[in-house]
Image (cartoon, rainbow, N blue to C red):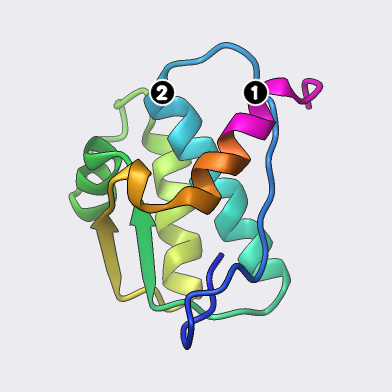
Amino acid sequence: MRGKSLGECVAGFYSNIGKSEVLQAEIWGLREGLFMTKKQWFYITEVKCHSEVLVKLLKEDMSDDHPLACIIQDCKNVMRDLRVQQVNHVYREANVCVDHMATRGKGAAMS
């Protein structure tokens, strides 16, 4: 999580969720970050995500029978609570902090 004024890293986390598809890892990371933000009573206006597919899933309606519908809906609900106004794609290379946390998560014990 970055602060608005200078873009400084305010909070972060990493976790090892085991073997999964990249999209699933992105969704779980987003969900955990959103819940962490909500727990800290922060409000955010923008979510930036490395996965263009995830950005599309968050912006569009989806059927209930989609395999990721439940976790996507969780994310949408929390984003509404946090007053998120934008969901945008950002290249992983442009976010050194998140890339570093992802690398640490790969070496962490399973959660």
Q: Residue furthest bottom?
A: 5
- Residue 11 horizontal/vertical position (percent): 67, 64
Residue at image position (36%, 23%) is 67
| Callout in the foreground (1, 2) | 1
* Amino acid type, label 2: Val
Q: What secondary structure is found at the residue carrying circle 1?
A: helix
Snapshot quadrant of residue 37: bottom right
Mark 1 vs 2, N-terminal side: 2
Snapshot quadrant of residue 92: top left
Front-lying residue, 28 or 75: 28
In the displayed structure image, the side of residue 3 where residue 10 appears, left or right = right
What residue is pinned by disc 2?
22
What residue is pinned by disc 1?
106
- Per the rendered image, the range of residues in magenta is 103-111
Which quadrant does the C terminus fall into? top right
Residue at image position (38%, 28%) is 23
Q: Is residue 84 above or below residue 101?
A: below
- Residue 49 horizontal/vertical position (percent): 35, 50
